[in-house]
Image (cartoon, rainbow, N blue to C red):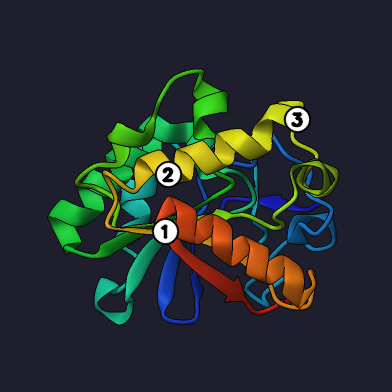
Amino acid sequence: MKKGMTILYEVHNNLYVNLTNKCPCACTFCLRQNMDSVTGNEDDTLWLEHEPSVDEVKAEFDKFDLNKYEEVVFCGYGEPTERLDALLEVAAFVKEKYGKKIRVNTNGLANLIWERDTTKDFSGLVDTISISLNTPDAKKYQEIVRSKFGDISFEAMLKFAGDVKHYVPNVILSTVDTTISHDEEAKCKEICDSLRVTYRIRPWED
C-alpha cells in the first residue's frame, strides 16, 4: 500500500475530496482493495499519510481552477462522514468561495457512526447525497458490505436516506449495473419509491 497526500483529485468533470481512509465497512467490491488510486496515475495514491486538517484541504483548492468542475464531491478512500465536522466546514467554504454544487458519496451509516441523527447537519450545504444501496435484501447487504455495525446497518441506511431528503434537495440510492438481477433492481426501485428518493443504476467501474 503506497501512501501520499492526494487530498483533491479529478474524475470526469468533478473535483473529489479525499478526507479520510476510515470506513465502518469492508465492502467486497471496494476498489481500494485492489488499487491505490482511481485517477489512472499511480502517484495519486488515495491512501493518506495523515488525515488532512481543514486548513490543508482549503489550501489545496488554490491549486485547481474550480470553473472546470460541475460538482465538488466528497468521496475518497474512506467514508467521508467519518469526518463529518470537517466535511461540513469544507463544504461551507466551497459554497461561499466558489459557489459550486456539493455532493457526498456515502454508505449512509453516519447516524451509526456518530450515534445521533446527523441528517439536519447537511442542510444548506449539500446539494446531493448519493448512498450505496447495493441490494434490496438486508441479509445480503451485510454479506456484501460487512459493516462493523452488523445487521442493523441496512435499516439504518434506509432511515438515513428517508430522513435526509428533508434537508438535501437530491437524495440518490444506487446499485451497480450487472451486480444484481433485474428482479432485484425492480425491488430496489420499489424501496426508493417508498422513500421518495431517486434510484440510480450506476455503471460498473473496473
Q: Which quadrant would residue 170 be assigned to in this image?
A: bottom left
Q: Is residue 22 visible?
A: no
Q: CA distance from mark 2 to mark 1?
A: 7 Å
Q: Say what secondary structure mark 3 lies in.
A: helix
Q: Say what secondary structure mark 2 lies in.
A: helix
- Which is more toward the observer, 184 or 42? 184
Please indicate whether residue 91 sits to the left or right of residue 25 in the image: left
Earlier residue among tags 3 and 2 = 3
In the rendered image, residue 11, in percent from the top left (x then y), is placed at 52, 75
Q: CA distance from mark 3 to mark 1?
A: 23 Å
Please indicate whether residue 156 sits to the left or right of residue 40 in the image: left
Tell me if label 2 and label 1 are in contact, CB under 8 Å: yes
**Disc 3 residue crowd, few under 14, some 14–19, many 20+, Cα 10 Å:** some
**Disc 2 residue crowd, few under 14, some 14–19, many 20+, Cα 10 Å:** some
Earlier residue among tags 2 and 1 = 2
Q: Say what secondary structure mark 1 lies in.
A: loop
Please indicate whether residue 144 sits to the left or right of residue 5 in the image: right
In the rendered image, residue 206, in percent from the top left (x then y), is placed at 77, 77
Residue at 57 percent of width and 66 percent of height:
189
Name the amino acid, label 1: Val
Quickly name the residue at label 2. Answer: 162
- Which is more toward the observer, 171 or 182? 182
Q: CA distance from mark 3 to mark 2?
A: 19 Å
Quickly name the residue at label 3. Answer: 151
Residue at 34 percent of width and 69 percent of height:
71
The mark found on residue 140 in the picture is none
Name the amino acid, label 3: Asp
Tell me if label 3 and label 2 are in contact, CB under 8 Å: no
**Disc 1 residue crowd, few under 14, some 14–19, many 20+, Cα 10 Å:** some
Name the amino acid, label 2: Gly
Quickly name the residue at label 1. Answer: 197
